Image (spheres, rainbow, N blue to C red):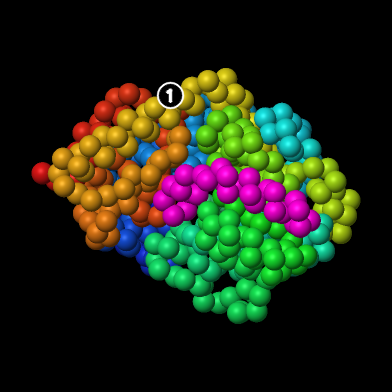
Amino acid sequence: MKKGKLRNNRDLIREAEKVLVGGVDSPVRAFRSVGDDPIPIKRGLGSQIYDYDGKSYVDYVLSYGAAVLGHAHPYVVNRLNRASLEGFSFGATCAEEVELADLIKKSIPLIEKIRFVNSGTEAVMGAVRLARGHTGRDKILKFTNAYHGHADYFLARGGSGLATLNIPTSRGVPKDFFTHTIITDYGDPKAIGSIFKRYRSKIAAVIVEPVGGNYGVIPPDINFLKKLRQITRQHGSLLIFDEVITGFRLHYGSAAAIFGVRPDIICLGKIIGGGLPIGAFAGSGEIMNQLAPEGSVYQASTFGGNPLVMTAGTATLTKLHSLKKDYNLLTDRVSDICETMEYEAGRKGVALKVNRFKTMFSIRFAKRRQFGSFYRRLLSLGVYLAPSEYESNFISFVHTRDDVEKTKRALGRALGS
Ligand SMILES: Cc1ncc(COP(=O)(O)O)c(C=O)c1O
């Protein structure tokens, strides 16, 4: 099918279904839980995205949190345009890699060395392997409803698409692969105590999203994060913060710094690539130098540190740095949206819970089937949220007061009378 023929949403999705599984390349993009076809997106500018019917939406998905400067920010576009004239990929170290690593290091002081990869999944896989290599232990503790990408040994009791599509454990993963995965509920210090008592010196690392972003927004329990730090240190295990969402999302730097908890390894992704595919894991020189070629923990990739991705990331962080005092403004805008939602729901007698933390928010209806009709109405009113109650929504630096007012009006109307 020629691209010119795919002029509207319906035609494109029908054609997509013939060649892509479910018409999508990631299950979270399917609109199964809202009972509709996915909306294909043709282009984005600032806070707006445009579908193939020519309809525009205020975008709160923002490429699942990556587009913190909105879409096609002119500063990033200019830098990318210039960089693209120099070639796309060489499989060799480049200045842009060093520049981005330096920017990240300066803003997250616990980092001495970093490795760039191509996705958050790869970042977490690298971090876990590194933790195992460093400690000589096998077991990894993760939390129910967290999502750390799609590595085999984490595809159980997870959030994100696993929760949306009700897949408790992915088929295709041998049972044995979960032998070294320990899963417990977030926020239960007693359970952590007994797990460490039971496994003692077998736990290589605890991995945690410092703010839960994959079962809706789960605000942090700072005492629990501190407990994780204390108990991992006591038992010689590492603490991994999965900041694929939270890195540069809550302020200019890591969530770790906000909560005063210093993990051993930090995973990044999304924002640091400015909307191009990226992941990174980082930590002290002592730990990171276990990686090949310095050490014998093997990790490699053809495209890691790709010059175009590094350029988009560097441009994004440079711009973000100049805007860093405005993160509070973004938080205020999210609060405004969430308070309106709560007020309108109360007024209309709709039972729901709005969760938020700084620049992230999510909405969960007491009756699950209510989300679908609410969501579809919201779409028709030009507001694009994540098509699942288990995903987080985000705001960018280019969402305007007008966008927020339009969103508030739409929320009220979408809840019905
Ligand atoms: C906390 C967290 N970790 C890891 C990942 C995996 O990242 P990616 O989809 O880039 O592989 C995600 C994806 O949303 C995430 O939210």
Please tell me which residue lies in front, 253 or 221.
221
- Farthest residue in the bottom direction? 175
Q: Secondary structure at mark 1?
A: helix
Q: Is residue 353 visible?
A: yes
Q: In which quadrant of the rendered image does the N terminus lie?
A: bottom left
Task: Return the x and y of residue 18 as percentages of the image width and height.
Answer: 38, 67
Position of 30 compared to 88: left or right?
left
Q: Quadrant of residue 370?
A: bottom left
Query: Residue shown at 16%/47% (left/top)?
Result: 349
Residue range corresponding to the magenta coloring = 210-237
Q: Quadrant of residue 17?
A: bottom left
Query: Residue shown at 59%/37% (left/top)?
Result: 259
Task: Return the x and y of residue 83 as percentages of the image width and height.
Answer: 65, 32
Q: Residues within 10 Å of mark 1 (few under 14, many from 20)?
A: few
- Farthest residue in the right direction? 294
Task: Return the x and y of residue 207 as percentages of the image width and height.
Answer: 63, 55
Q: In which quadrant of the rendered image does the C terminus lie?
A: top left
Query: Residue shown at 51%/72% (left/top)?
Result: 170
Residue type for callout 1: Leu
Total number of numbered labels?
1
* Rendered view: 301 above or below 307: below
Q: Is residue 293 visible?
A: no
Query: Residue shown at 56%/43% (left/top)?
Result: 222
Q: Quadrant of residue 301?
A: bottom right
User: Is residue 18 within the magenta segment?
Assistant: no
Please tell me which residue lies in front, 231 or 278.
231
Task: Return the x and y of residue 25 as percentages of the image width and height.
Answer: 47, 59
Residue to which mark 1 is pinned: 329
Position of 80 compared to 4: left or right?
right
In the image, the residue with mark 1 has its CB under 8 Å from the nearest atom of ligand 1: no
